[in-house]
Amino acid sequence: MMGHRGLTAYAADGLRPRLIQTGRLRGSDLMQIRRAEAADEEALASIRRRAILALAVPAMSREQAERWATRGAADRVARAMREHDVWVAVEGAAIGWVEVDRDRVAALYVSPSCSRRGVGSVLLTFAETSIRSSGYTTARLESSQNALDYYLRRGYLQCGPADSDGAWPLRKDLAAVTPNQ
């Protein structure tokens, strides 16, 4: 979690708001969250691949993790930036990212070297705030087995069985959440 809540600014960016947040993570330099840019594509794809291979393997086989990391990897990030809101956590360089598709957290990845420092929690809270400010009262996502407990601890509830890829559908009532949660 951020130890210090920093500046949050809204500014017009075409039809979509541009939200920038800064703050400090536990014992770290200043972190910024900003909208992803085309120049971020390679770094975000690398974070996705490394996160899947390093963090998902305990909950699935190496082969399953490789298939997931490779599935749609060629244009995954470019398509996300083109079709949805993608936000990047930057601490000197990109260290994580989140993709928001209307009321759905479509992706959340953190560089393995930055895991367990609060980056994912900050990005998830940021995504939920974005979803709430867009008028939705519920956030949805699909969780891999390795991240399921993470989301359950953050107030998400299972709303169905895992699909054929092992993704668990989850939801969270945002109307009951205060903006600082």
Image (tube, helix red, strand yellow):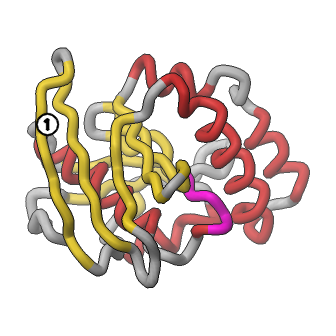
Q: Residue tagged by mark 1? A: 134
Neighbor class of circle 1 (other Cα within 10 Å; few <14, some 14-19, many 20+) is few
Q: Reply above or below: 19 against 41.
A: below
- Residue at horizontal 47%, vertical 59%? 91
- Residue at horizontal 12%, vertical 25%? 12
Query: Can you name the residue that lies furthest to the right here?
Result: 63
Taking 151 as reference, is 68 left or right? right
Q: Is residue 161 visible?
A: no
Q: Reply above or below: 95 against 5.
A: above
Q: Reply above or below: 70 against 7.
A: above
Residue toward you, 148 or 89? 89
The stretch in magenta equals: 109-113
Q: Give the secondary structure at mark 1.
A: loop
Taking 31 as reference, is 138 left or right? left
Residue 18 found in image quarter: top left
Where residue 112 appears, as percent x and y from the top left, is 67, 64
Where residue 57 appears, as percent x and y from the top left, is 79, 63
Indicate the quadrant containing the C terminus: top left, top right, bottom left or bottom right: bottom left
Taking 151 as reference, is 129 left or right? left
Indicate the quadrant containing the N terminus: top left, top right, bottom left or bottom right: bottom left
Taking 84 as reference, is 44 left or right? right
- Residue at horizontal 82%, vertical 40%? 67
Q: Is residue 79 magenta?
A: no
Query: Can you name the residue that lies furthest to the bottom here?
Result: 27
Where residue 96 appears, as percent x and y from the top left, is 52, 53
Marker count (numbered)? 1
- Residue at horizontal 76%, vertical 62%? 54
**Label 1 amino acid?**
Ser
Where residue 107 appears, as percent x and y from the top left, is 49, 44
Q: Is residue 46 visible?
A: yes
